Image: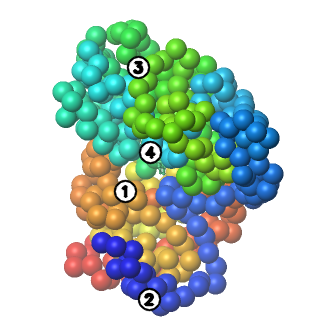
């Protein structure tokens, strides 16, 4: 498929959709708004030192390097690590690939990779890719709320294990894992096993301190913290050796060469700084909005199932509900017409209409996974946004259910 194949139907779709009077954007899983201060910081950086390459020795290069250093120091302060422990990539996907493939060097003596069965595909796919190089990939099962089976982990981690990767917060169902228990099990079994956490959905939602978390590698994505798209980072604990998986151009980023996305990094850093500064009030606000949305839906619409845990083991922004007898994709379009933007399953799966592997892993049936909506509240939503969604949703569900061949 080429872009020109796509452009006509997309133009027509946009035209026939029209602009809704009110809009509530709840698709922060797939991307979302940029905090205005982050956007301003990007613009200022372009103006002041946008020409420079941070590795080059002239005034513009030095200014660019200075901006890079300040941005990195800001992120390091927020997650309590040293700036030298931060490697920039251009996305969370790249950070996860670097963690998993870079730790293997493609030929480690340790040949076992353990990931939880509900990891983001940017962890699962590189792990599976390593099978080509003789690695064995084990997917640790989870229970009905998405918590990793710790006995299974304990049985399978051994001196053959290269890396264990478990996301601190699951991106689809919001499960907050007990990372301390996971880390203790792995370290008790073998001190040489690397521990990676995909923290893309943890930052800004749970307290995140690299010293306390005590893992070897952690991935971040700028747009998941309301920064710009196209910037990400991997925390690589001092002393941990990775092999680059991208080669070429000299840059300050030895593990991910190529020119740094300077405006992206500066916007990312500003967003992290603001989310860190307002952490407590943000979490309180998101939790309140999340609870209003979850209880409003479960109390007003029949045949609904909450996916993931209730209460404080759930990320403050995450709402994932299966609407039985309802096709999730059709529902996203129906809601879009009313200015409510949500996703069905995760973006990676919804485009190919595969049911989410996360929902299947927690024991949902195919039809329950297909009928799911993922909504993420943010500190920038209001209670009136949630009320609007609760007003519109029952009618939209009723319409989609009335078209379904299988009714309640
Ligand atoms: C948990 C998690 N990991 C990784 C990614 C990938 O990040 P990016 O979109 O920056 O590639 C996402 C994106 O949504 C995510 O939710």
Residue corresponding to mark 1: 348
Q: Name which of mark 4 and mark 2 comes first in the sequence.
A: 2
In the displayed structure, 274 sits above or below 133; it is: below
* Helix, strand or loop for disc 1: helix
* Helix, strand or loop for disc 3: strand
Residue 37 visible in the current orientation: no
* Helix, strand or loop for disc 4: helix
Image coordinates of residue 135 in percent, x first then y, are: 22, 27
> How would you rate the neighbour count of disc 4 (Cα within 10 Å): few for under 14, some for 14-19, many for 20 or more?
many
Q: Which mark is residue 337?
A: none
Give the residue drawn at x 65%, y 68%.
Answer: 385
Residue corresponding to mark 2: 12
Residue corresponding to mark 4: 93
Q: Choose between 78 and 58: the one closer to the eye.
A: 58
* Helix, strand or loop for disc 2: helix
In the displayed structure, 71 sits above or below 337; it is: above
| Quarter of the image where the N terminus is located | bottom left
């Amino acid at each position: 498929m080429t872009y020109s194949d796509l452009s006509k139907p997309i133009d027509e779709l946009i035209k026939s959709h029209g602009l809704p009077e009110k809009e509530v954007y709840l698709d922060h899983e797939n991307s979302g708004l940029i905090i205005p201060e982050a956007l301003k910081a990007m613009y200022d950086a372009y103006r002041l030192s946008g020409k420079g390459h941070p590795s080059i020795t002239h005034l513009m290069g030095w200014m660019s390097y200075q901006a890079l250093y300040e941005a990195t120091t800001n992120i390091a302060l927020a997650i309590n690590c040293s700036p030298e422990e931060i490697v920039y990539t251009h996305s969370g996907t790249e950070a996860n690939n670097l963690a998993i493939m870079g730790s293997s060097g493609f030929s480690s003596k340790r040949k076992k990779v353990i990931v939880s069965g509900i990891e983001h595909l940017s962890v699962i796919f590189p792990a599976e890719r390593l099978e080509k190089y003789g690695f064995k990939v084990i997917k640790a099962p989870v229970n009905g709320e998405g918590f990793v089976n710790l006995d299974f982990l304990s049985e399978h981690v051994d001196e053959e294990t290269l890396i264990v990767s478990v996301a601190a917060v699951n991106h689809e169902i919001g499960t907050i894992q007990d990372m301390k228990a996971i880390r203790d099990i792995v370290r008790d079994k073998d001190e040489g096993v690397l521990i990676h956490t995909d923290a893309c959905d943890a930052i800004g939602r749970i307290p995140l301190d690299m010293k306390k978390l005590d893992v070897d590698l952690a991935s971040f994505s700028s747009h998941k913290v309301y920064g710009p798209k196209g910037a990400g980072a991997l925390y690589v604990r001092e002393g941990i050796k990775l092999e680059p998986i991208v080669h070429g151009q000299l840059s300050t980023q030895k593990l991910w060469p190529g020119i740094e996305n300077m405006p992206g990094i500066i916007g990312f850093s500003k967003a992290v700084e603001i989310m860190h500064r307002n952490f407590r009030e943000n979490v309180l606000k998101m939790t309140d909005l999340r609870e209003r949305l979850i209880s409003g839906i479960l109390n007003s619409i029949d045949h609904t199932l909450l996916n993931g845990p209730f209460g404080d083991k759930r990320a403050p922004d995450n709402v994932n509900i299966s609407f039985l007898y309802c096709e999730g994709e059709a529902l996203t379009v129906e809601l879009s017409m009313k200015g409510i933007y949500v996703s069905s399953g995760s973006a990676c799966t919804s485009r190919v209409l595969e049911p989410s592997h996360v929902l299947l892993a927690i024991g949902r049936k195919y039809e329950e996974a297909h009928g799911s909506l993922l909504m993420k509240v943010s500190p920038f939503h209001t209670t009136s946004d949630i009320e609007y969604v609760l007003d519109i949703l029952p009618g939209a569900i009723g319409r989609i259910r009335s078209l379904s061949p299988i009714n309640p």
